[in-house]
Image: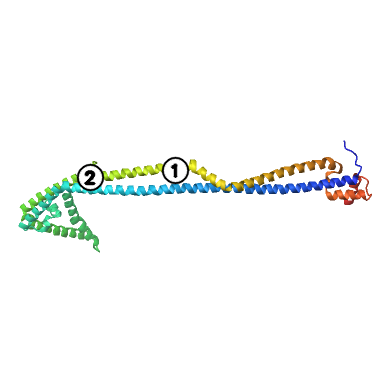
Amino acid sequence: MAQPISDQVGFLGEACRAVQELSVSKSLLERFRLEEKRLEKELDAERRAVTDAISLTVKKRIEEINNTYDREIAREQDRLKRMRNKREKAKSQGIRERIEEETEELKSSNRELKLKMKAAFQQDRVPGFCKSGWYYALYFPSGISEFFLLFVTILLCFLAIPCGIYLLLPVKSLYHLIGIYFATILFFGSLYILINNRTKVRHQNVLKNGRSIRDLMKSNKRKIRVITRNIKRDRDEAVYNLEKYDDEIARTEQDLADIADQKKEALNTFDKVTKTIIADEIAGNSRERLDRLKEDYEEAAANVREAEIRVKEQTLFINDNYASYVGKEFMIPEKLDELADMIRMGRASTISEAEILYKSLKE
């Protein structure tokens, strides 16, 4: 049960001091909260700095490991490429030598046949152009290629050339075309008959013998192509003595596999062991500052909690002992002093009268 107030002025003085003490406590609480917030940010920043330093260092170390092993792998890959190129060159050289060896007899036979044909033509005074493939295609055709050459020659002489001449004429007519064809047939026909009389008729036997020689040379060339194709398709590489290249390639491939395994093991060891050591070292370098910041932060947090308790207790004390008598609207130091002055000066005998007088004066 509330007790009557005997000393009105003293009561108001005590209330004023309590309110002032509460104001001081609130200001101190606010200062403690700001300090706690500042220390919390600084602590978080330091922790992030440590985490970032660990992350950056770990990333850098992993890149260094990868780059070191990747350089070795690239060096071995270049070496492997060079060895494979050397092997391929040696195989190509072996194939060429094998082709040369297995076709030498046929090539020698063709050279002898060519000399024989040349000697026969010279002895019988046959013109040199009669040895050409074009001449034999025109006068002694044999085989698909020579008949094709004959067909192309006919198209050229009796179609392409007359049509080309006709297209070049400034004035074109059917008579012009007929005239061009007549002249062309006459010219090339006469030329063909002239060459025939001067060569084929005069040197019939030699040219026929030349036909036989050309057919035999063509047969030899066909055999050379078959031998060449079979050698290139042959999968048996034992005859080329490539063992030293194969051994070197195998060693290089094994070295590559070993380096890849070493790289994998190095990364695994770094992930399981080295990374932890690095993290501990970096954290250890910052541990003293982190511990100090943590202690300061915990101390600031404890101060905030104590100040909050003090403010709560003072607030409840004021509410129970003073605000219930005076009213919250007058729980301000200036107003409490004015109420005390009114009572002290005899203008009011009680707190209630002083409040009524205060309100009337302010209206």
Residue 308 spot, x, y in % from top left:
74, 43
Q: Amino acid at mark 1?
A: Ala
Residue 96 spot, x, y in % from top left:
21, 48
Quarter of the N terminus within the rendering: top right
In the picture provided, is 54 more to the left or to the right than 312?
Answer: left
Is residue 108 visible in the rendered image? The answer is: yes
Residue at mark 2 to residue at mark 1: CA–CA distance: 41 Å
Residue 286 spot, x, y in % from top left:
58, 48
Q: Amino acid at mark 2?
A: Tyr
Q: Nearer the viewer, residue 277 or 107?
A: 277
User: Going by the picture, which residue comes out furthest to the top?
Assistant: 1
In front: mark 2 or mark 1? 1
* Residue corresponding to mark 1: 266
Residue at (6, 53) in percent of width and height = 206
How many circles with numbers are drawn on the protein? 2
Label 1 sits on a secondary structure element that is helix
Q: Using a 10 Å C-alpha cutoff, classify the residue at mark 1 as few (fewer than 14 neighbours), some (14 to 19) or many (20 or more).
A: some
Label 2 sits on a secondary structure element that is helix
Residue 199 spot, x, y in % from top left:
8, 56
Is residue 218 visible in the rendered image? The answer is: no
Mark number, residue 240: 2
Q: Nearer the viewer, residue 219 or 3?
A: 3
**Vertical relation: 318 (above or below) 199:** above
In the picture provided, is 319 more to the left or to the right than 173?
Answer: right
User: Which of disc 1 and disc 2 is earlier in sequence?
Assistant: 2
Residue at (78, 48) in percent of width and height = 24
In the picture provided, is 140 more to the left or to the right than 236?
Answer: left
